[in-house]
């Protein structure tokens, strides 16, 4: 049982994710962007960073690389896919979630702790939380404002997974910062669960995302 | 045939443009009260294609797949056929 962690030039949260998966009791392997065949993996994490320098739009270039075909194939096989921060932007650009994460309302890089409300606890990643539970996970982004043209459809299909519980730091539509696909197996989230895996770091709420993902495999 | 291509990418009307808002505020600090500030991105390249229609079709595909995100962007494509003659009248 191995989770694949995709690396692009400019990815920089890959090792934190590797450690988080280990802490959650799983096994992880790195995958380079040109690997199209991901059939050996039981799940995928696309970590944060600045793939391809955020050129054009955050995630735009990464979303057109060969590894994306492998990710799409795994989604068809109903395996879990987690995109964090730049990984979430990439999932938006691929079109696996119904929306995009674009430049913050006030265009500055926000790096701070945030309180998140779990709006949907039926996904593998959030199943260890109560619905409505408020958790502590940090954010670190300048392009995290969620925008969608399908807000009503998203609500009907229960695709809003995480919302900022207090301040909305980036102007996201309805304070949304975690979105899943129709199946709930693809989660795109701007906050960094891999940075909240032990109380020593301020919170261990993030570890549950990886534990839940591993449980579902 | 070689064509000079210019793709202009802009946010759809009504989309918040934080970069433009910041520029407008900064201009105001300099004493210039302007309205309706927008930013656009221009991408240029040279493309070989069979005809102008062929070029447009290819560039449109590039826009849909990579250069723009149709959820938030509008784009315009400007195509100029490159003059490949040397100026002496030869073909």
Image (spheres, rainbow, N blue to C red):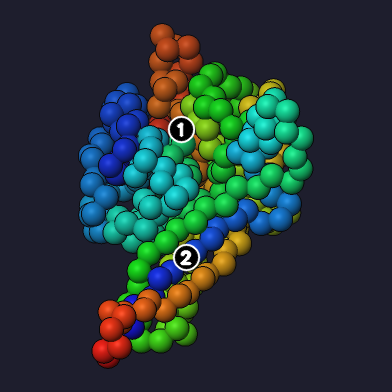
Give the farthest residue toward the front.
B88
Taking depth in this image into account, of A20 and A164 the one nearest to the observer is A164
Taking depth in this image into account, of A194 and B21 the one nearest to the observer is B21
Q: Position of residue A176 (x, y in %)?
A: 64, 38
Q: Position of residue B8 (x, y in %)?
A: 54, 60
Q: Few, some or many C-alpha atoms within 10 Å of disc 2 (few <14, some 14-19, many ≥20)?
A: some
Give the farthest residue toward the bottom.
B91
Q: Position of residue B30 (x, y in %)?
A: 68, 27
Nearer the observer: mark 1 or 2; the answer is 2
Query: What residue lies at 38% left-to-right and 64% top-to-bottom?
Result: B45
Give the residue pinned by disc 1.
A209
Residue A16 bears which disc, if any? none
Taking depth in this image into account, of B51 and A162 the one nearest to the observer is B51
Provide the chain ID for the residue under circle 2: B
Query: What residue lies at 28% left-to-right and 29% top-to-bottom?
Result: A15
Residue B28 seen in render: yes
């Amino acid at each position: 049982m191995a989770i694949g962690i995709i690396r692009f030039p400019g990815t920089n949260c890959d090792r934190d994710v590797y450690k988080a998966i280990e802490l959650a009791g799983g096994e992880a392997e790195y995958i380079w962007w040109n690997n199209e065949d991901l059939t050996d993996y039981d799940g995928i994490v696309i970590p944060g960073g600045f793939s391809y320098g955020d050129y054009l739009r955050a995630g735009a270039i990464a979303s057109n690389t060969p590894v994306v075909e492998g990710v799409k194939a795994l989604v068809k096989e109903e395996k879990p896919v987690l995109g964090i921060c730049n990984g979430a932007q990439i999932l938006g650009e691929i079109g696996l979630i119904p929306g995009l994460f674009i430049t913050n309302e006030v265009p500055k890089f926000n790096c701070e702790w945030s309180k998140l409300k779990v709006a949907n606890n039926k996904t593998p990643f959030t199943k260890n939380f109560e619905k409505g539970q408020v958790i502590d996970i940090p954010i670190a982004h300048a392009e995290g404002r969620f925008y969608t043209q399908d807000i009503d459809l998203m609500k009907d299909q229960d695709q809003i997974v995480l919302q900022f519980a207090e301040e909305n730091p980036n102007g996201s539509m309805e304070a949304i910062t975690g979105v899943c696909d129709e199946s709930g197996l693809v989660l795109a989230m701007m906050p960094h669960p891999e940075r909240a895996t032990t109380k020593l770091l301020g919170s261990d709420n993030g570890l549950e995302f990886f534990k839940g993902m591993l449980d579902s495999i | 045939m070689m064509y000079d291509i210019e793709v202009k990418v802009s946010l759809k009307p009504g989309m918040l443009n934080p970069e433009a808002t910041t520029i407008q505020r900064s201009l105001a600090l300099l004493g210039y009260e302007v309205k309706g500030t927008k930013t656009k991105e221009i991408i240029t390249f040279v493309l070989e294609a069979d005809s102008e229609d062929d070029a447009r079709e290819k560039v449109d595909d590039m826009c849909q797949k990579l250069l723009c995100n149709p959820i938030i962007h509008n784009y315009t494509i400007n195509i100029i056929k490159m003059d490949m003659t040397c100026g002496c009248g030869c073909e």
